[in-house]
Amino acid sequence: MVDLVSQYQNIQEQVQEKMNEVLSSAQFINGPEVKSFQKELEDYLDVKHVIPCANGTDALQVALMSLGLKPGDEVITANFTFAATVEVIDLLRLKSKLVDVDAETFCIDPQAIEKAITPNTKAIIPVHLFGQCAPMEEILEIAKQHDLYVVEDTAQAIGAGYTFSNGEVKKAGTMGTIGTTSFFPSKNLGCYGDGGAIFTNDDDLAHRMRGIVNHGMYERYYHDEIGVNSRLDSLQAAVLRVKLPLLDSYNEARQKAADYYDKAFETHPNIQTPARNQAVSTHVFHQYTLRVTGKDRNALQKFLAEKEIPAMIYYPVPLHRQKAYDDGSYADEDFPVTMQLIDEVISLPMHTELTQEQQNYITSQIIEFLGN
Ligand SMILES: *Cc1c(COP(=O)(O)O)cnc(C)c1O
């Protein structure tokens, strides 16, 4: 699915040099590398504050902790996403409200958000799923009307841009109250271990989150609130400082690979290629996800595995059907799009080092299996 070895070989010298500097300095935690990376990411995203942390799940958790929500307050998020998004809501004893997604973009459906709002709703977490921004203009409008916080889960879409109807362009993760991301190795900007970051333009929230990630400590050994221990280590920051300047070219390589897949499947009656809502959002293709219609998706996956082509189902089980999150209040009928997607989606190999030869093999095998 991803080829991190080839990507590493292309940047090996710079990475090793940077890592050696960190090793020689022995400043492994909160050293100058982390500060420099923070600054460089703030510049790249054009956001006032970046708060580095240990992973993308912590980033979501700390973001929610900073908003001063009370147990039972409701947070709306998508039913079709990675579990981390909903996990942190329930972990904090908030109430998750799962809603359906859009059939074209797989991202949270604004109409479903509006229907789920109650007097207890306090926040929305849109997920920029598979690399394309959720419809932020509509979501921000809903949030404004109902006085809700918006926390953007940008783990799959770092570097994507969103264009508002007034022509203004903003980077994913910088539009809502807070944005969060993950630097898990296979993400579009991945380090060589765990890492994450939180973004905001709000000075007070940034101050609060800097305290929360450091044991609720604002002055050394004075703990004003219960925090967590969530840090990006300096070796990971060193890797990220080499890769951040390459992020746009990495995302372009993914888009080029997506173009190739799109073209190969353009007219196939059983394949729906991922919609690109290009007038509004760039798509940075964390995943390239097809919908297979009128044919057996699972049989296709099995066939590809036999041909040594990895293909994954993101996501096979919707969150409302997961034991941890099924509180009895949901029915499959509440999520017609999600229920269809879980049977139809299949994600193909997608990374920065895909060759045309590999893609030619992948696409021809898929077409051979499906016919035409
Ligand atoms: C990867 C991911 C996360 C979690 O990030 P970690 O760094 O693995 O904790 C959260 N949300 C989404 C949508 C993700 O894809």
Image (cartoon, rainbow, N blue to C red):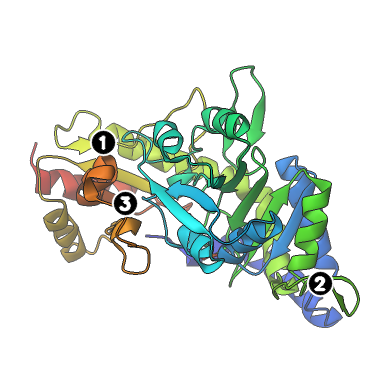
Element under label 1? helix
Label 2 vs label 3, nearer the camera: 2
The image quadrant where one finds the N terminus is bottom left
* Label of residue 57 in the image: none
Q: Residue at x 20, y 28 (%)?
A: 267
Label 1 vs label 2, nearer the camera: 2
* Label of residue 264 in the image: 1
Q: Which of marks 2 and 3 is nearer the N terminus?
A: 2
Residues 271 and 308: in front is 271
Is 34 drawn above or below residue 167 in the view shown? below
Percent of width and height locating residue 300: 15, 54
The answer to whether residue 62 is visible is yes
Q: Residue at x 16, y 51 (%)?
A: 297
The residue that disc 2 covers is 30
Residues 341 and 311: in front is 341
Circles 1 and 2 in contact, beta carbons < 8 Å: no
Q: Which of marks 1 and 2 is nearer the N terminus?
A: 2
Element under label 3? strand
Amino acid beneath label 2: Asn
The verdict on label 2 being within 8 Å of ligand 1 is no
> Residue furthest toward the front?
119
Circles 3 and 1 in contact, beta carbons < 8 Å: no
Q: Quadrant of residue 207?
A: bottom right
Q: How many marks?
A: 3
Q: Residues within 10 Å of mark 3 (few under 14, many from 20)?
A: many
Distance between mark 2 and mark 3 Cα atoms: 37 Å
Amino acid beneath label 1: Ala
Percent of width and height locating residue 148: 61, 40
Residues 27 and 219: in front is 219
